[in-house]
Amino acid sequence: MLRGFNILLGPALFLFFYFYIGPFDGMSNESFAIFCSVIWIATWWINEAVPIPITSLLPLVLFPLTGGLDLSSTSSAYGNKIIFFYMAGFFLAIAMEKWNLHQRIALLIIYFVGTNKKRMVLGFMLATAILSMFLSNTSTSIMMLPIGIAIASQVSLRKNLSNSNFGKVLMLGIAYSASIGGFATLFGTPPNLILQSNVEQFFNYKIDWDEWFAMAFPLSISLLLICWIYLTNFSYDISSSSKINNNIIKEKLKKLGEIKHEEVIVLSIFFLFIISLIFKKGIEKYLIFIDDTIIAIFYAILLFIFKSKDKKQKIITWEDSVKLPWGIILLFGGGLSVAAAMQESGLALWFGEKAYLLNDLSVIFIILLIVLAVNFLTEITSNLATVSMILPILATVSISLGINPLIIMISATIAASCAFMLPVATPPNAVVFGSGYLKIKDMIRTGLLMNFISIIIVSIYICFVLPEIWDLESIVLMESLN
């Protein structure tokens, strides 16, 4: 019954606004058509009446039929270069997982941190965050979960897993660090790439990989350490837990054996990939048209060329590509088509003109409101869907308010990765919730305060530290006004 209501709610709202409300003051017919279409899309994204990737195909139907945006322009968003950058990065992740390189990296970090309970939690969080910077935060949390369960079950011999404080802390640490580590790099989490595409589309400004890392990494590490202190000292008392035996980690490392030929190849390609992104500006002197996507695709192709030690198979094969997150790729396309439609139809500009209501507010308060709204909206819907809906609006609102667009848009994007309260908020939250150590009330109790901590830290960092790291004097704002 409820599912049927959720399915009908989207088209019902669309029909009501389209046929009975009519264009609002100052709206063109095209922008109103996109407005009504986005209401339907957003409704299904939020209530998940149908799978989110399928909802992401709606622009291909609604935008052309309503006259909001032609089919060629709508469909071109699904082939955006950002999507291919993400696909290439995921091929690297597939190779790491196939040859267990990611597990070796995680176990080594945990082993060297030590067996003190608080330090063990820190080791898990560091390993998860570092892997999540370069792999999908979903696959990272799935990979870390069995290792965490093995350690937690040794510390707490209780039959009722939900009574294990150490287990709760460790599971939450894995989930939170996967999300926090993800926003440190451009391809660490999909919302970052949606931001990059929107900034380039609206303002013709390219956010480079090294530029983003220099800005986001300090915030990621700071928030990670604060999260660790909060979890191990203020959330649950883990002092009464029994001592951790490091033998489990040793046994798992021993089982992996010495580093394999295939792992060396994947690790070499991975490091060359990162180095190429960092030194792209130097490479541009010799290859003028080099781009992050070109670099990523080149190294992804290498994975299909090099062979395993026994020469019987390639490092990855086309059959391995079935692991690509095709649902997220469709969601990328849907989000980018929404952004293109809002810009070309004038809908984003219409929203920007209504921003005069915020003119009297200070910048820090505006950022705080945006971070707060995005943070809690992400608790009930996909963070990728959230930023896809809100970034085109913020792009024009920032101009109307006379605020540099990067400040507003980055704050919203990072806030979308900081939802810690509900299992449905992020894939890592859902993964650890299935471990048996956590109840809904545990996640709400711990995550609510962590949400507010992240809201304050992100807002202060973006408002006061970001301008010191990036030269935001006028580049984006001037180009957007011309």
Image: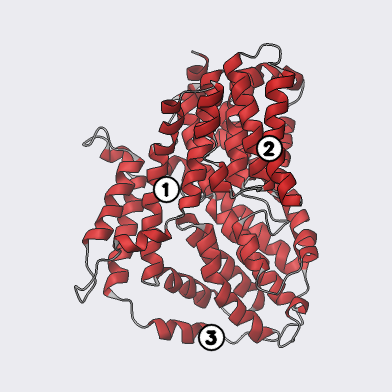
In terms of image quadrants, where is residue 35?
top right
**Marks 2 and 1, the one that precedes in the sequence:** 2
Q: Nearer the viewer, mark 1 or mark 3?
A: 1
The Cα atoms of the two marked residues, 3 and 2, are separated by 51 Å
For the question of whether residue 399 can be seen, the reply is no
**Marks 1 and 3, the one that precedes in the sequence:** 1
- SS state under label 1: helix
Q: Amino acid at mark 3?
A: Ile
- SS state under label 3: helix
Question: Residue drawn 74% across and 19% down?
Answer: 21
Residue under numbered circle 3: 248
**Residue 10 numbered mark, or none:** 2
Q: Amino acid at mark 1?
A: Tyr
Q: Residues within 10 Å of mark 3 (few under 14, many from 20)?
A: some
The Cα atoms of the two marked residues, 2 and 1, are separated by 30 Å
Q: Nearer the viewer, residue 113 or 309?
A: 309
Question: Residue drawn 63% across and 45% down?
Answer: 416
Q: Amino acid at mark 2?
A: Gly
- Residue 159: image x %, image y %? 74, 86
- Residue 27: image x %, image y %? 64, 14
**Residue 65 numbered mark, or none:** none
**Marks 3 and 2, the one that precedes in the sequence:** 2
Q: Nearer the viewer, mark 2 or mark 1?
A: 2
**Residue 86 numbered mark, or none:** 1
